[in-house]
Image: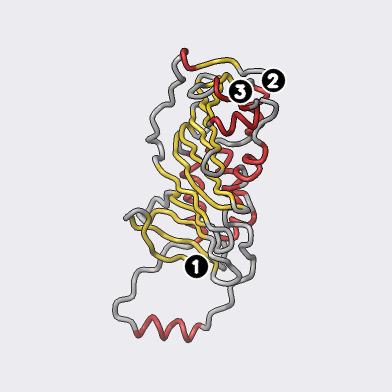
């Protein structure tokens, strides 16, 4: 392999941050008229309990996610006409995980990280671009030992790395501010809180469970960059195992 899949990585790595968070505004929430607020609350006989604040939900979701031992992140979005996807499951620190990156219908790679080693499997279309069509056929249904130097090119593609980048990004952290609306919704049938900007936003959202735990469930992209990241199986992902020795070969040279 002459070089890592830079085009796919360039698009997928910032997914956790830019999937719909680029374009979140930073406008201050306009002050609400106190009289109007009292009128609406007093006239309703079935007023629901006030939802938790955005800052509380944001902080709790971050703390719980980063404190987890394992998890699963999956998502798909469109960029410049290409369908890009990521499926990452395993330990939060990345020491034991399965990472799948896809671009379009035919190009996909899977990297298994087990016991300090990295094993790369990919579609024939991907290999053809890296080592040529002839060698690509010999790599079908095989895993190659991915050298440490090559593995480093995948940067912080671990659950911890993606979470840290996501929560630290200024374009997502605006959702813990006063300009954030907290509304009730559901994710896969479960009650959830949805955080979106009141003004200046573009549809991007952060969704957490409404069971008092604020478990991170989903990030939704804005209208001009549709897509989503789903978060699941917190502390429930089974250990990833290494491929059978008969399936593993050394990286072919050009």
Figure quadrant of the N terminus? top right
Q: Residue 242 location in percent, x, y?
A: 46, 20
Q: Residues within 10 Å of mark 2 (few under 14, many from 20)?
A: few
Q: In this orientation, which residue lies closer to the viewer: 182 or 36?
A: 182
What's the CA distance linking mark 2 and mark 1? 55 Å
Name of the residue lying farthest toward the top: 246
Q: Which residue matches tag 1?
A: 181
Q: Are marks 2 and 1 in contact (CB under 8 Å)?
A: no
Mark 3 or mark 1, which is nearer to you? 3
Q: Which residue matches tag 2?
A: 254
Q: Are marks 2 and 3 in contact (CB under 8 Å)?
A: no
Q: How many marks?
A: 3
The image quarter containing residue 155 is top right
Q: Where is 41 relative to 88, above or below?
A: below
Q: In this orientation, which residue lies closer to the viewer: 80 or 168?
A: 80
Q: Which residue matches tag 3?
A: 134
What's the CA distance linking mark 2 and mark 3? 11 Å
Relative horizontal placement of residue 73, taking residue 30 as reference (left or right): left
Mark 2 or mark 3, which is nearer to you? 3
Q: Earlier in the sequence, mark 2 or mark 3?
A: 3
Q: Residue at x 49, y 47 (%)?
A: 75
Q: In this orientation, which residue lies closer to the viewer: 126 or 98?
A: 126
The image quarter containing residue 151 is top right
């Amino acid at each position: 392999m002459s070089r890592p899949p830079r085009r796919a990585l360039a698009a997928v790595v910032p997914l956790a941050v830019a999937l719909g968070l680029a374009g979140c505004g930073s406008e201050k929430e306009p002050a609400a008229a106190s009289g109007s607020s009292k009128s609406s609350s007093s006239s309703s006989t079935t007023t629901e309990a006030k939802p938790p604040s955005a800052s509380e939900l944001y902080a709790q979701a971050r703390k719980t996610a980063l404190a987890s031992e394992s998890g699963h992140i999956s998502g798909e979005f469109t960029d410049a006409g290409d369908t890009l996807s990521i499926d990452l499951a395993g330990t939060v620190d990345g020491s034991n995980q399965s990472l799948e990156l896809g671009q379009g219908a035919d190009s996909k790679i899977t990297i298994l990280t087990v016991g300090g080693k990295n094993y790369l499997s990919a579609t024939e279309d991907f290999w053809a671009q890296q080592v040529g069509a002839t060698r690509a056929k010999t790599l079908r249904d095989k895993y190659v030992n991915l050298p440490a130097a090559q593995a480093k090119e995948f940067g912080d593609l671990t659950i911890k790395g993606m979470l840290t980048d996501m929560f630290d990004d200024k374009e997502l952290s605006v959702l813990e501010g006063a300009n954030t609306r907290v509304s009730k919704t559901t994710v896969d049938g479960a009650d959830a809180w949805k955080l979106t900007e009141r003004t200046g936003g573009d549809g991007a959202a952060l969704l957490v469970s409404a069971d008092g735990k604020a478990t991170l469930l989903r990030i939704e992209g804005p209208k001009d960059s549709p897509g989503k990241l789903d978060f699941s199986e917190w502390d429930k992902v089974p250990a990833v195992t290494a491929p059978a020795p008969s399936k593993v070969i050394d990286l072919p040279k050009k």
